[in-house]
Amino acid sequence: MQKKLTIHDIAKLAGVSQATVSRVLNQKPTVDPGIREHVMKVVNEHGFVPSIAATILRGGRTQLIGVLAPPLTSPFVPEIMLGVAEVTDRTEYEVVLYMMSPTRKHSDVLDRILAMKLSTGLLAIMPGKLGPHLDFLSKQGVPIVTIEDQVAPINTPWIGIDNLHGGYEATRYLLSLGHRRIAHILGPPNFLCTNERYEGYCRALREAGLEVDSSLIWQGDFTILGGSTCAHAIFSRPPQERPDAIFAANDQTAFGVMDVAEQYGVRIPDDLTLLGFDDMPMTAFTKPGLTTIRQPHREMGMLACELLLSMISPQKHPFVPLHSDDENGIQVVSQNSIQRGTPFRFGEGNSAHAVFQGGMQRGTRGGETFSGPEEGDSKNLRILLPTKLIVRESCRTAQSVSR
C-alpha cells in the first residue's frame, strides 16, 4: 500500500519549506505566483490532499461549510442545495450536509460539530425549534445564516421570501378574476409565514373594499390531510354558502382540496377556482394544473451561501459593494422594528428586499439600490426574496364559474 504523502513530503519534492506549502494550500496572497504555481504542480502530480485534522490542530480554518437541513424528502431542500452548490463551486469551500431528524437533540450535535471545528460556518435550513440555540451561537460569534419562515431569529441573519406580498398577490389575482367569496386555508397557527400570508390576504381584500369574512377562514396545517379536512367542511355546506375561490396557504393543502373536490363532484375550475403557494414540482402535472405562488428556493440557497461566505471571509468574499446613494430614500422607523429597503438585485433578473433591525446603510448592487446594516450590525439582517405568480388551469374568472 502506497504511503500517504504529508505536507513535509510535498515541501521536500518542491524544494521549499513546509511553511511555504502551507501558505500555498491556504491560498495566502503573500506567496510569489511562480512559487505558488510550482508547488501546486507538485501537489496535483502526486494527488496530495491536505489533512483536515492537521489543519485544525495547527489552529487553521477548514474550508468546509456546514449545512443543517431537514430530510431530503422535503420538496424544497434539493433546490436550495443546488443554489448553495452554485456558489461554492466558484470558491475554495466545500459543503458538509447534516440532516435533522425529529428523534435527535440537535443542539448537542451542533455543539459537538462546532467544538471539533469541522465547519467554518453554518447555513441552517428551516431550523424551527433549533432557532434559539442558533441565535445563542450566533451571538457568541459563530458565522451562521438561516433560511427560515417559521420563527423569526433574533440574532441570526436570515433569508426568506416576502410571504406577506405573496399572500397579497395571490388574493389580488383572485379578485382580478371577479371573485368575491374567497376562502383562505391557513397554515400551522404558530408559523410566521402563516401569519404573513394571511395578512397579505386580508390586505388585498380590504383594498378591494371587502371585509374579512371569518366564515371563509379555515385552519389547516400545510399537509394534504389538513387540506382534505378543510375541504370536507367547505363542500358539506350548501352550494350558495360555499366560496367561489380558495387560496390555500401551500400547495400540499391545495392537493388535499383537489382530491376532496372530486369526491363531491366539484369541478376545478368550472365550479371552484383554486390557488396554492410554493410551486412544488408536481403542481404543473396535477389535473388541472395548479395556479400557485412560486418560491425562489434556488436563489435563496445562493444568497444565503453568499452571505455566509462574506461573514467568514469578508475581504475575499464581500457580500455586496457598498456605495453612498442619497438619491434613493430608505424608510427608517423605530430602532427595534422591521425596516424595509428598496429592491436590490443579486443576480440576473433577481431582486430582493433587505430588511433589518437596527442601524441602516445604503448601497447598490447590480445597478439597484438596497439598504444594509451598519458595520458590525449584520446579525440583524433579514433579506426577503420576491415570489412570483404562476398561472395554470385551476383558476377561472368568476363569470365562467358555475354555481
Image: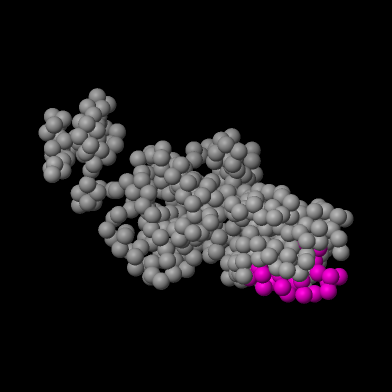
Q: Is residue 116 left or right of residue 257?
A: left
**Residue 155 visible in the shown view:** no
Type of secondary structure dominating the magenta stretch: helix
| Quadrant containing the C terminus in the rendered view | bottom right
| Quadrant containing the N terminus in the rendered view | top left
- Looking at the image, residue 254 lies above or below residue 341: below
Q: Position of residue 185 (x, y in %)?
A: 69, 67
Query: Who's the residue at 42% across and 58% down the image?
Result: 68
Query: Who's the residue at 70% across and 68% down the image?
Result: 260
Query: Who's the residue at 65% across and 62% down the image?
Result: 255
Please tell me whether residue 114 belongs to the stretch shown in magenta: no
Q: Position of residue 73 (x, y in %)?
A: 49, 59
Q: Position of residue 204 (x, y in %)?
A: 76, 58
Which image quarter: residue 209? bottom right
- Looking at the image, residue 281 lies above or below residue 30: below
Which image quarter: residue 15? top left
**Residue 18 visible in the shown view:** yes
**Picture colour scheme:** one colour
Which image quarter: residue 87? top left
Q: Which residues are magenta?
A: 226-245
Please tell me whether residue 234 belongs to the stretch shown in magenta: yes
Q: Position of residue 140 (x, y in %)?
A: 37, 60
Query: Who's the residue at 13% across and 37% down the image?
Result: 9
* Closest to the observer, 204 or 336: 204
* Closest to the observer, 304 or 283: 283
- Looking at the image, residue 109 lies above or below residue 25: below
What is the count of numbered marks?
0
